[in-house]
């Protein structure tokens, strides 16, 4: 029937009003593990998702609520989030507008990281006898970074390091050291006696 045809904006508005008028979805407390947590660099609002057993829901915590919260959110931590369910009408996504957040336990990702740290510790990777002392004034310095990165440019322009020889090992942002770069890094360590591997 023609009377049942509505626009997208009208549909999202209708759903939004339904959710806002549902008392069960106001002041709701939801438990889940934080994932994809990030803070917008301009607004200061935080965006993340709560996940549990293969399901997740998007969440927003505005800057004021985040600043009042005593707990600093991190990925992999199980939390209790209290807030209201609302629809962000421009894209039709429903989400929790979080007012309060408290930790309730350790999430799966945190446990995975701790398991890796324990495995490396059992292999002796963190043993004190494996550590080499750093010289007070190294003769050679290697910088593992993007050649356009601030760290490399700052080091190259440093007066303190001007008299020391150095080598840049290229690294993609957010990525691993390429195989060729890794070879140069190991060769540098072997020739200079620097700590690392």
Image (spheres, grey):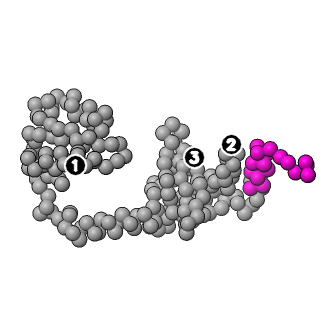
Position of residue 5 in the picture relative to residue 30 (left or right): right
- Residue 16 falls within the magenta-colored stretch: yes
Q: Mark 2 points at which residue?
A: 90
Count of numbered circles in the view: 3
SS at badge 3: loop
Residue at horizontal 10%, vertical 50%? 190
SS at badge 2: loop
Residue 130, located in which quarter of the rendered image? bottom left
Crowding around mark 2 (Cα neighbors within 10 Å: few <14, some 14 to 19, many 20+) is few
Crowding around mark 1 (Cα neighbors within 10 Å: few <14, some 14 to 19, many 20+) is some
Marks 1/2: CA distance?
A: 46 Å
Q: Mark 1 points at which residue?
A: 182
Marks 3/2: CA distance?
A: 18 Å
Q: Name the residue under label 3.
A: 62
Q: Which of marks 3 and 2 is nearer the N terminus?
A: 3
- Nearest the viewer among 113 and 65 is 113
Q: What stretch is highlighted in magenta?
A: 1-19
- Nearest the viewer among 66 and 16 is 16
Position of residue 58 in the picture relative to residue 185 (left or right): right
Residue 184, located in which quarter of the rendered image? top left
Give the percent coordinates (x, y) of residue 43. 54, 39
Residue 136, located in which quarter of the rendered image? top left
Residue at horizontal 25%, vertical 35%? 152
Q: Is residue 110 visible from the viewing direction of this image?
A: yes
Position of residue 75 in the picture relative to residue 5 (left or right): left
């Amino acid at each position: 029937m023609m009377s049942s045809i509505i626009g997208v904006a009208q549909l999202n508005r209708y759903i939004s009003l339904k959710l806002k008028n549902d008392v069960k979805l106001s002041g709701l407390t939801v438990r889940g593990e934080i994932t994809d947590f990030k803070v917008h660099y301009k607004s200061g609002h935080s965006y993340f998702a709560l996940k549990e057993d293969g399901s997740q829901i998007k969440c927003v915590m505005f800057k004021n609520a985040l600043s009042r919260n005593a707990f600093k959110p991190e990925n992999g931590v199980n939390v209790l989030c209290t807030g209201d369910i609302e629809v962000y009408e421009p894209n039709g996504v429903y989400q929790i507008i979080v007012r309060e957040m408290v930790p309730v336990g350790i999430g799966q990702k945190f446990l995975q990281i701790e398991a890796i740290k324990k495995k490396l510790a059992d292999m002796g990777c963190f043993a004190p006898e494996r550590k080499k002392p750093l010289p007070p004034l190294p003769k050679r310095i290697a910088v593992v970074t993007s050649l356009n990165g601030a760290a490399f440019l700052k080091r190259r322009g440093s007066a303190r390091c001007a008299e020391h020889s150095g080598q840049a090992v290229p690294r993609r942002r957010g990525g691993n050291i390429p195989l060729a770069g890794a070879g140069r890094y190991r060769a540098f360590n072997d020739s200079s006696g620097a700590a690392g591997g």
